[in-house]
Image (tube, rainbow, N blue to C red):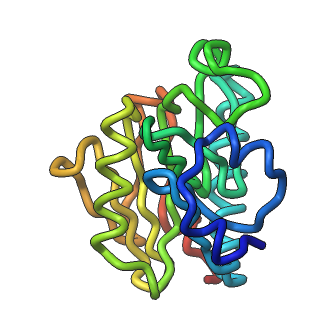
Amino acid sequence: MTTPELATKIITGEELYEMGDVGRCELVEGRIVQMSPTKPQHGQFEYRVANIIDKFAREKDLGVVMVGEVGIYTGRNPDTIRAADVLFISHDRLARATPNSFLDVAPELIVEILSPGDRWSDVRQKLRDYFDIGVTLVILVEPQARVVSAYRSPNDFVELDAQETLLLDDVLPGFSLPLSDLFASS
Protein backbone atom coordinates (compact mmCIF):
# COMPACT_ATOMS: atom_id res chain seq x y z
CA MET A 1 0.00 0.00 0.00
CA THR A 2 1.42 3.38 -0.94
CA THR A 3 1.44 6.35 1.36
CA PRO A 4 0.04 9.75 0.28
CA GLU A 5 3.63 11.03 0.27
CA LEU A 6 4.73 8.27 -2.11
CA ALA A 7 1.72 8.81 -4.38
CA THR A 8 2.79 12.43 -5.01
CA LYS A 9 6.55 11.85 -5.32
CA ILE A 10 7.92 11.38 -8.85
CA ILE A 11 9.77 8.07 -9.09
CA THR A 12 11.27 5.92 -11.83
CA GLY A 13 10.11 2.54 -13.00
CA GLU A 14 13.23 1.03 -11.50
CA GLU A 15 12.37 2.53 -8.09
CA LEU A 16 8.84 1.15 -8.33
CA TYR A 17 10.21 -2.28 -9.25
CA GLU A 18 12.55 -2.26 -6.23
CA MET A 19 9.67 -1.40 -3.86
CA GLY A 20 8.23 -4.87 -4.24
CA ASP A 21 4.51 -5.33 -3.73
CA VAL A 22 2.88 -1.92 -3.29
CA GLY A 23 -0.55 -3.18 -4.30
CA ARG A 24 -2.38 -2.80 -7.60
CA CYS A 25 -1.14 0.33 -9.30
CA GLU A 26 0.28 1.90 -12.43
CA LEU A 27 3.02 4.48 -12.70
CA VAL A 28 1.80 7.44 -14.75
CA GLU A 29 4.39 10.09 -15.57
CA GLY A 30 6.37 9.11 -12.49
CA ARG A 31 3.46 9.06 -10.04
CA ILE A 32 1.91 5.96 -8.52
CA VAL A 33 -1.78 5.64 -9.33
CA GLN A 34 -3.57 3.13 -7.10
CA MET A 35 -6.05 0.72 -8.68
CA SER A 36 -8.85 -1.05 -6.84
CA PRO A 37 -8.91 -4.85 -6.70
CA THR A 38 -10.71 -6.51 -9.60
CA LYS A 39 -14.21 -7.86 -9.22
CA PRO A 40 -14.91 -11.60 -9.63
CA GLN A 41 -16.33 -11.22 -13.17
CA HIS A 42 -13.21 -9.32 -14.26
CA GLY A 43 -10.98 -12.09 -12.91
CA GLN A 44 -13.12 -14.73 -14.57
CA PHE A 45 -12.78 -13.10 -18.01
CA GLU A 46 -9.09 -12.44 -17.51
CA TYR A 47 -8.57 -16.13 -16.81
CA ARG A 48 -10.73 -17.30 -19.73
CA VAL A 49 -9.00 -15.07 -22.28
CA ALA A 50 -5.52 -15.90 -21.00
CA ASN A 51 -6.25 -19.62 -20.93
CA ILE A 52 -7.57 -19.68 -24.50
CA ILE A 53 -4.68 -17.63 -25.92
CA ASP A 54 -2.08 -19.52 -23.86
CA LYS A 55 -3.30 -22.91 -25.07
CA PHE A 56 -3.03 -21.77 -28.70
CA ALA A 57 0.37 -20.08 -28.25
CA ARG A 58 1.83 -23.13 -26.49
CA GLU A 59 0.57 -25.57 -29.14
CA LYS A 60 2.19 -23.45 -31.87
CA ASP A 61 5.24 -22.47 -29.75
CA LEU A 62 4.65 -18.81 -30.62
CA GLY A 63 5.49 -17.11 -27.35
CA VAL A 64 4.36 -16.46 -23.81
CA VAL A 65 1.09 -15.31 -22.25
CA MET A 66 1.22 -13.27 -19.04
CA VAL A 67 -1.57 -12.16 -16.70
CA GLY A 68 -2.12 -10.24 -13.50
CA GLU A 69 -1.52 -6.59 -14.28
CA VAL A 70 1.88 -7.12 -15.89
CA GLY A 71 3.93 -3.90 -15.79
CA ILE A 72 4.91 -2.54 -19.22
CA TYR A 73 6.98 0.60 -19.80
CA THR A 74 5.05 2.93 -22.10
CA GLY A 75 7.01 6.09 -21.38
CA ARG A 76 10.34 7.29 -19.99
CA ASN A 77 11.48 10.42 -18.19
CA PRO A 78 9.11 10.58 -16.42
CA ASP A 79 8.33 6.87 -16.49
CA THR A 80 4.91 5.43 -17.22
CA ILE A 81 4.24 1.76 -16.53
CA ARG A 82 0.86 0.40 -17.56
CA ALA A 83 -0.63 -2.73 -16.01
CA ALA A 84 -2.01 -5.12 -18.63
CA ASP A 85 -4.66 -7.68 -17.73
CA VAL A 86 -3.40 -10.21 -20.32
CA LEU A 87 -0.60 -10.01 -22.84
CA PHE A 88 1.04 -12.18 -25.47
CA ILE A 89 4.68 -11.65 -26.37
CA SER A 90 6.62 -13.67 -28.93
CA HIS A 91 9.78 -15.52 -27.93
CA ASP A 92 11.78 -13.11 -30.10
CA ARG A 93 10.53 -9.97 -28.39
CA LEU A 94 10.73 -11.51 -24.92
CA ALA A 95 14.40 -12.40 -25.52
CA ARG A 96 15.09 -8.64 -25.94
CA ALA A 97 13.48 -7.69 -22.61
CA THR A 98 15.61 -6.59 -19.67
CA PRO A 99 15.63 -9.28 -16.97
CA ASN A 100 14.51 -8.35 -13.43
CA SER A 101 12.54 -5.35 -14.62
CA PHE A 102 9.10 -4.42 -15.76
CA LEU A 103 8.59 -5.34 -19.42
CA ASP A 104 10.55 -2.87 -21.55
CA VAL A 105 9.71 -4.45 -24.91
CA ALA A 106 6.27 -4.09 -26.44
CA PRO A 107 4.22 -7.28 -26.51
CA GLU A 108 2.37 -8.01 -29.73
CA LEU A 109 -1.02 -8.34 -28.04
CA ILE A 110 -2.65 -6.81 -24.97
CA VAL A 111 -6.10 -7.68 -23.67
CA GLU A 112 -7.90 -5.36 -21.27
CA ILE A 113 -11.04 -6.46 -19.47
CA LEU A 114 -13.16 -3.36 -18.96
CA SER A 115 -15.04 -2.75 -15.74
CA PRO A 116 -18.21 -0.66 -15.47
CA GLY A 117 -16.28 2.07 -13.62
CA ASP A 118 -13.55 2.47 -16.25
CA ARG A 119 -13.45 5.99 -17.68
CA TRP A 120 -13.29 6.07 -21.48
CA SER A 121 -10.72 8.90 -21.40
CA ASP A 122 -8.38 6.63 -19.38
CA VAL A 123 -8.96 3.69 -21.73
CA ARG A 124 -8.20 5.88 -24.78
CA GLN A 125 -4.98 7.08 -23.16
CA LYS A 126 -3.94 3.50 -22.44
CA LEU A 127 -4.64 2.59 -26.08
CA ARG A 128 -2.43 5.47 -27.28
CA ASP A 129 0.31 4.47 -24.84
CA TYR A 130 0.28 0.87 -26.03
CA PHE A 131 0.37 1.72 -29.73
CA ASP A 132 3.08 4.35 -29.20
CA ILE A 133 5.47 1.62 -27.98
CA GLY A 134 4.72 -0.79 -30.83
CA VAL A 135 1.93 -3.06 -29.59
CA THR A 136 0.30 -4.62 -32.68
CA LEU A 137 -3.17 -5.35 -31.33
CA VAL A 138 -5.21 -4.38 -28.26
CA ILE A 139 -8.39 -6.27 -27.41
CA LEU A 140 -10.97 -4.66 -25.15
CA VAL A 141 -13.46 -7.07 -23.58
CA GLU A 142 -16.68 -5.60 -22.20
CA PRO A 143 -18.27 -8.46 -20.21
CA GLN A 144 -21.50 -6.69 -19.32
CA ALA A 145 -22.16 -5.52 -22.89
CA ARG A 146 -20.94 -8.88 -24.27
CA VAL A 147 -18.78 -7.02 -26.79
CA VAL A 148 -15.14 -7.35 -27.85
CA SER A 149 -13.30 -4.60 -29.71
CA ALA A 150 -10.07 -5.35 -31.59
CA TYR A 151 -7.87 -2.26 -32.03
CA ARG A 152 -5.03 -2.14 -34.53
CA SER A 153 -4.52 1.57 -33.77
CA PRO A 154 -6.46 4.04 -31.64
CA ASN A 155 -8.67 4.79 -34.69
CA ASP A 156 -8.73 1.42 -36.48
CA PHE A 157 -10.91 -1.09 -34.70
CA VAL A 158 -13.69 -3.59 -35.19
CA GLU A 159 -16.39 -4.24 -32.62
CA LEU A 160 -17.74 -7.79 -32.34
CA ASP A 161 -20.74 -9.09 -30.45
CA ALA A 162 -21.19 -12.45 -28.74
CA GLN A 163 -22.39 -14.12 -31.97
CA GLU A 164 -19.22 -13.30 -33.95
CA THR A 165 -15.71 -14.77 -34.09
CA LEU A 166 -12.52 -13.00 -33.07
CA LEU A 167 -9.62 -13.60 -35.49
CA LEU A 168 -6.06 -12.67 -34.51
CA ASP A 169 -4.15 -13.72 -37.64
CA ASP A 170 -1.88 -10.67 -37.58
CA VAL A 171 -0.52 -11.70 -34.16
CA LEU A 172 -1.45 -15.37 -33.73
CA PRO A 173 -1.81 -16.91 -37.22
CA GLY A 174 -4.72 -19.35 -37.32
CA PHE A 175 -6.25 -18.22 -34.02
CA SER A 176 -10.02 -17.85 -33.92
CA LEU A 177 -12.36 -17.58 -30.97
CA PRO A 178 -16.14 -17.82 -31.26
CA LEU A 179 -17.14 -15.15 -28.77
CA SER A 180 -20.12 -17.24 -27.71
CA ASP A 181 -17.49 -19.51 -26.07
CA LEU A 182 -15.95 -16.56 -24.23
CA PHE A 183 -19.30 -15.24 -23.01
CA ALA A 184 -20.80 -18.66 -22.20
CA SER A 185 -22.30 -18.76 -18.71
CA SER A 186 -21.31 -15.20 -17.91
Which residue does the image show at 63% across and 44% down from the upper left?
53
Tell me the quadrant of the picture where the C terminus can be found.
Answer: bottom right
State the image coordinates of residue 59 (x, y, percent, origin top left): 73, 28
Q: Measuring 31% from the left and 58% from the top, which residue is drawn there?
A: 125
Work out whether residue 176 can be spotted: no
Give coordinates of residue 48: x percent, y percent: 68, 61
* Image vertical order of residue 47 relative to residue 40, above or below: above
How far across and down, in percent of the image, does residue 77 sit?
Answer: 43, 37
Give the mark count: 0
Q: Position of residue 163 (x, y in %)?
A: 39, 69
**Of residues 50 and 31, which is closer to you in this image?**
31
Q: Is residue 68 left or right of residue 123?
A: right
Going 53% across and 54% down the picture, which residue do you hit? 10
The quadrant of the rendering that contains the N terminus is bottom right
Q: Name which quarter of the figure residue 103 lies in.
A: top right
Q: Can you see residue 98? A: yes
Q: Is residue 122 above or below residue 125?
A: below
Nearer to me, 112 or 73: 73
Q: Residue furthest left?
A: 155
Position of 8 relative to 29 (above/below): below
Q: Up-down: is 107 above or below 96?
A: below
Q: Is residue 44 left or right of residue 144?
A: right
Q: Residue at x 24, y 43 (%)?
A: 153
